[in-house]
Amino acid sequence: MLDAIARGSVVATGGPGTGKTLVAVEAVVRAVAAGTSPERVMVLAPTRMAAADLRDRVSLAVNRPTGVPLVRTPSSLAFSILATRAAERDEPLPSLITGAEQDVVLRELIAGHLDGAVAGPDWEGIIAPGARELPGFREELRNLMNRAAEADVEPGDLAALGERAGRPEWVQAAAVYREYLEVLQLRSGPSDAGVRFDHAAIVARAADELHGGLAEGRPSSWDLLVVDDFQDVTAATAALVGLIADSGTRVLLTGNADQTVEGFRGALAHGLDHSVGRLRATHCELGTGYRQRGSLAAVTARLAGRIAVAGIGSARASGRADAVAVPRADGAVEVLTAAHGYAQSRAIAARLRAARHGANGAAPIAWSEMVVIARSRALLRDVRSDLLAADIPCESLGDGVALHREPAVAPLLTMLRVALGEPWTEESALAVLGSRVGGLDPVAMRRLRRELLREERAAGGERSSVDLLLDALADPARFASLRGPEARLAARVAAAVGAARTRANEPSSTPGAVIWAAWTTLGVSSEWREAALAGSARDDADLDAVIAVLRAAQTYSERLPTAAALAFLDYLEAQDFAADVLGARAQGHDSVRFATPASAVGREWDLVVVAGLNEGAWPNLRLRDSVLGSQRLAEALAAGPAGALERASGDRDMRQARREVLDDETRSLLVAVSRARKRLLVTAVTDGEQLASRFVAVIESAADVEARDAAREPLVADLRAVVAALRTNAENAVAAGSGERSVGHNAAALARLAALGELTADPSTWYGVAEPSTEHGLWEPDSVVRVSPSRYDAVRRCPLRWALETVGGTVETSEAQNTGLLVHALAERLPNGTQQELLEAFDDEWGAPPVTLPERTQYESTRQMVVRLAGYIGSRGGVAVRTELPFRVQIDNALLSGIADRVEVEPEGATVVDLKTGRPISKADAEDHGQLKLYQLAANYGGFEGVEGVNGATLVFVGPGAAAGGTVVSQAPIDDEDVRAELRGVVATMTSRGFEACINETCRSCPVRRSCPAQPQGAQVSE
Ligand code: SF4
């Protein structure tokens, strides 16, 4: 085959592990050895990951320094072609826009259409208006535009094809496509910046350039072009390769149509077959598999046999040979089922750990030689987090979160905004101080605020801790007089903001320089780096994120040299999803890898885990062709001008379409299982609702194994489980009086683990053994404490819950709370509103009409609350009302403050009204209602401006179960002295050093139940 390559173009096909990539590498080595300059050899791989791996192999094999990268992706090659031409014409260099930037452009365009600012396409009858705002719609548009761009189809051609094929969605999408291209042109930046391309269009543009060069008789830049995994390249790349071949370059394509996994990105399984004719190439098939033997090879061959043949691109010779030549049932393939997702992860963890330690006499396998492959990234994330919890080193997934939302980046950007002139707010200050870069936990934060207050009160000041904190952040020196490490951490944040501000005010500062000034002043990088090197995936990922933001800032400045830091912040924060990573993410040296089938292409591991092989998930037979039909467009365009109309028109043959989807799913599984060199573990969840995939039976039959229930398998425990078992054994031995020998055996094992560095084995780290970390309460006993009505009730109900919630043990805002906020907002805006006015305002606030059943139910239930609210307001006609009335008054050591929903003023006196959207309570409960008592007390002590005492207080319930005009439950006027005494008790509880757990009717929904000694799940483990 290598001789054939020396003579002309070759298409080399072969099953998994037959050495296709090795042929690609050897072809380069031979060409260089025969005198071809490395600069005249080009190797392409379809994805960045594959290109990074191949680059290492080719560089090592060639073993010569080269002036240019030998291995590129098609986009990178296209970019270099366009950049070279631009340089020759003395034009500015072009640039690439990321997928995230592309999404921002589309979002702005669609928002303009929806606002009516720009007349947009007519989506009526195709996409509902509400759906046009969703990210999924933009993704559909992006896919369709990318398919068109890859095939070099202009917006006008797309619209014409849509017209003729009766596809109005393509006609409308073509209008967006045109606008998008115009915007891209406009955004090319200053006049000295070059044209901007997205990844889809750049290859087609480069092909245009080459075409022009060919017509001018320009010689080729390369003697040899090698494309590995050609089955995954797009039609545009295939066309580019064809043009390079036309210019006299020898071409080697390697691949296997059965391993096509980039179909959803426009890869065409028939590409290899077509290329043999297009390039007038010699076809060779590699017939010997070297990676797999026995049952592994049998599984791979059986799956390949289930895929429809895509011409000579489907290489099956090695599979046929392996399937007949080797024994099965060799223990290399194992299938496990688990009762739920977590059990599946535990089973995987156990098998990985056993393999790492060479259990059952097998040779140990390094963590980095293991991979978990799943069809969805969501499942990969779940499994990875469970494996991390089992102390298995895992590589970073490096995706998912938009850069500006990364935990390490978000606070940096907030600090930057402050440095550029935005004031600190309570929210931003607490977010930054409590973040990864700030380093204060809720308790430290509380200590810091208490220290600030202590100083303030000592100096006779009256400012609140929030005001003091915001003032101090403006001046790092302000923290110098405070005690404790938290003051130093806060001072570091303040100093970093100051450094960024100084840098931003310098004449030639760039966004990157401003971020760098803040980052270096924070001084956390070496601490994070050490932790990352010690195996902390979190520190590793956070460092990566900071580097990514610095790199994004640099790219931004290169494109827009005069743009200010604030513009960069706006640009970054407009991105909804993770930007394309520019280089491969750093991988820990010895950690388990994670991959989807697409990212596993071209790689191999000793142990492969295929997780989540469930029916409906893998294969997922949902037809890929969604609302805008991008897949259909790709198929139509691949059929060429003659066949495009026929492929684009009419309904699809559904059976055929499903068959094609099943083939795609089988191909991706084939890629996954064929990555294994020594062992394959397949797992599925079978819980009555989920079934094992049909592929499980295929694998069982091919490997001659049976699926086993993970619950019945002995699990190699993680270290934590080992420590727990040793502790239990030791304690049981003591309790049973089994003698020193038995206790000593377990204790010695614990001591040995602790000496080896396993912290959990060291008794000083055990819960219930250590001394309390502080003897201080949340406030000093004589402090003035702010008491709000809700806090007052919370302390009275259960001091422990109040204390834990105060330091962060709360849950996120629920849907019910959001509903309550909406009803309160309407009551505030329209204190005397009619039902019609209130309902109109409600519909305005609600926004898009509800579509799904849960949305409709929620809408209807909230609407009924508004109707009841209107009923109540109607019944109070003629009463003077003040809404959202603040109050503030100090009584003894309590600073009462808050806001009352309504204060109704009648000739016989005022009444404080509190609106409730929960279920009504009894009259007796209302009499002891703490919030109402506090409102009354505050009013009677002059806390409400313009209200001199009240004549009772009222709860108005408008939620489910309330009467048509709201259920009104009143509290009689209070005895001030009684409530004042009660308030003193509440303040004493708040400033004490211990908090009692008081069982009450809200325990069932208490968010800190697991930390509550009064509950079984919160009991001390040392009891
Ligand atoms: S579970 Fe009940 S007793 Fe325990 S902290 Fe929560 S509210 Fe208090």
Image: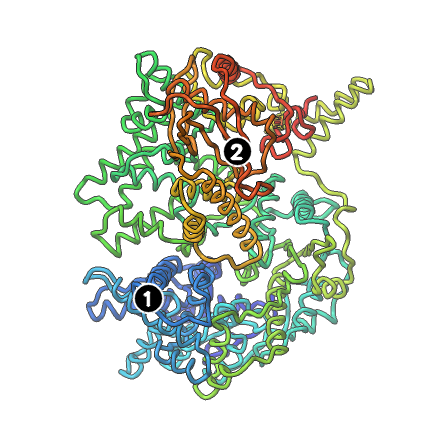
Residue at 46% over, 72% down? 125
Res. 541 visible in picture: no
Confirm whether residue 622 shows in the render: yes
Q: Picture quarter containing residue 507?
A: top left
Tell me the quarter of the picture where residue 642 sits.
bottom left
Q: Is residue 356 above or below residue 527?
A: below
Label 2 secondary element = loop
Q: Residues within 10 Å of mark 2 (few under 14, many from 20)?
A: some
Q: Position of residue 658 (x, y in %)?
A: 62, 73
Left or right side of 423 for 56: right
Of the two numbered discs 2 and 1 on the same chain, state the one appearing first in sequence. Answer: 1
In this view of the protein, which residue sits in the foreground, 382 or 668? 382
The quarter of the rendered structure image containing the C terminus is top right
The amino acid marked with disc number 2 is Thr
Please state the quadrant of the image where ligand 1 appears: top right
Rendering coords of residue 631 (x, y %) = 50, 73
Q: CA distance from mark 2 to mark 1?
A: 47 Å
In the orientation shown, which residue stands out farthest toward the left?
Answer: 507
Q: Amino acid at mark 1?
A: Phe
Q: Residue drawn at (22%, 35%), measured in percent from left and top?
A: 502
Q: Residues within 10 Å of mark 1 (few under 14, many from 20)?
A: many
Location of residue 273 with respect to 62 vertically, above or below: below
Identify residue for label 2.
810
Q: Which residue is mark 1?
A: 197
508 vs 220, nearest the viewer: 508
Q: How is the image coloured?
A: rainbow
* Mark linked to residue 658: none
**Tag 2 near tag 1, CB within 8 Å:** no
